[in-house]
Amino acid sequence: MNRTLRWQKSTFSDGGEGDTCVELAASPDVIHLRESDTPTTHLTTTPTALAHLLNGIRTDRASHPVQAG
């Protein structure tokens, strides 16, 4: 089944009507992300992977990765 995705603008975007925002769409078990200035190009991930990324950013782990010993 080919469904049309419902894109939602990030609340962290500048609020303008231009193409300066990140958009998100969800389908079963998949999160789609794109920039509004290139709407035909998007990436996909799972909700769990995106949650881990966002948690790492919030806790500053993304800039200080743990090295395997």
Image: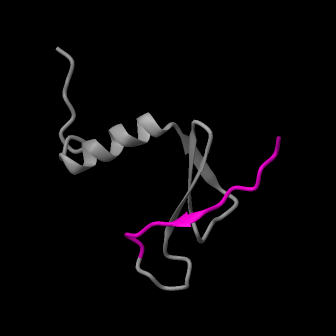
47 lies above or below 25 = above
Residue 33 placement, left or right of 1: left
Residue interval drawn in magenta: 1-13
Depth check: give the residue in front, 10 or 39: 10
Residue at 34%, 37% in the rendered image: 52
Q: Is residue 56 above or below residue 4?
A: above
Query: Looking at the magenta stretch, what is its main secondary structure?
Result: loop
Residue at 20 percent across and 40 percent down: it is 61
Q: Is residue 8 magenta?
A: yes
Q: Return the x and y of residue 40 as percentages of the image width and height.
A: 70, 60
> Quick one: 36 or 3, which is closer to the camera?
3
Q: Left or right: 11 with respect to 24? A: left
Rendered residue at 61%/62% (across/down): 7
Quadrant of residue 68 within the rendered picture: top left
Give percent across and percent down for residue 25.
Answer: 59, 55
Is the residue 65 above or below the residue 44 in the image? above
